[in-house]
Image (cartoon, helix red, strand yellow):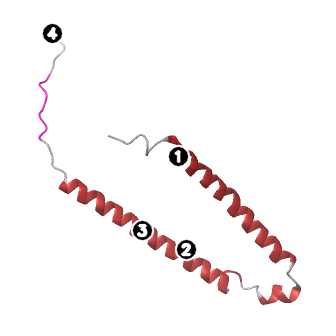
Amino acid sequence: MRNRVAHNDVHRVRSLAARAAVLALVPATFALIAATAAAAETPATAERWSEGLAGPVGIVAVALGIGGLIIGLLRRRRTVAARIAVAETRPMSAVRPEPARSDSAA
């Protein structure tokens, strides 16, 4: 039986509020950082950092993306393995077929 005190709607509301705050603050922070960098950009710095994705920032972004992909795949593999282990250790009961019913026999 589920513990109603530990699993009430307050935790769900807090979780949704935290996710909404993150979804609002992260793009705002990125926009602020980009605006600050754009305001400080001069022609000399534009030439210096015009490497695009081949530059150090792009390489770090790709490395983080690949790292996140690998971590996500390993996490998924671990959860599937745990589900299989639980399914294999759970005792199975015999399924008894119900007698067939016909519409004419009533």
Amino acid at circle 3: Leu
First reached walking from the N terminus: tag 1 or tag 3: 1
Tell me which corner region of the image, top left, top right, bottom left or bottom right, holds residue 54.
Answer: bottom right
**Region of the chain picked out in magenta, as a range:** 94-100
Residue annotated with mark 4:
106
In the rendering, which numbered label is found on residue 12? 1
Residue 40 x/y as whole percent:
86, 80
Q: Nearer the viewer, residue 67 or 43?
A: 67
In the picture as drawn, the residue positioned furthest to the front comes out as 5
Q: Main secondary structure of the magenta part?
A: loop
Circle 1/circle 3 CB separation < 8 Å: no
Q: CA distance from mark 3 to mark 2?
A: 12 Å
Tell me which corner region of the image, top left, top right, bottom left or bottom right, holds residue 72.
Answer: bottom left
Residue annotated with mark 2:
65
Residue 39 x/y as whole percent:
87, 76
Residue 72 to residue 18: above or below = below
Instruction: Please state if 44 lies on the left or on the right of 53 as rendered.
Output: right
Amino acid at circle 1: Arg
Disc 4: CA contacts within 10 A as few (<14), some (14-19) or many (>=20): few
- SS for tag 4? loop
Residue annotated with mark 3:
73
Q: CA distance from mark 2 to mark 1?
A: 29 Å
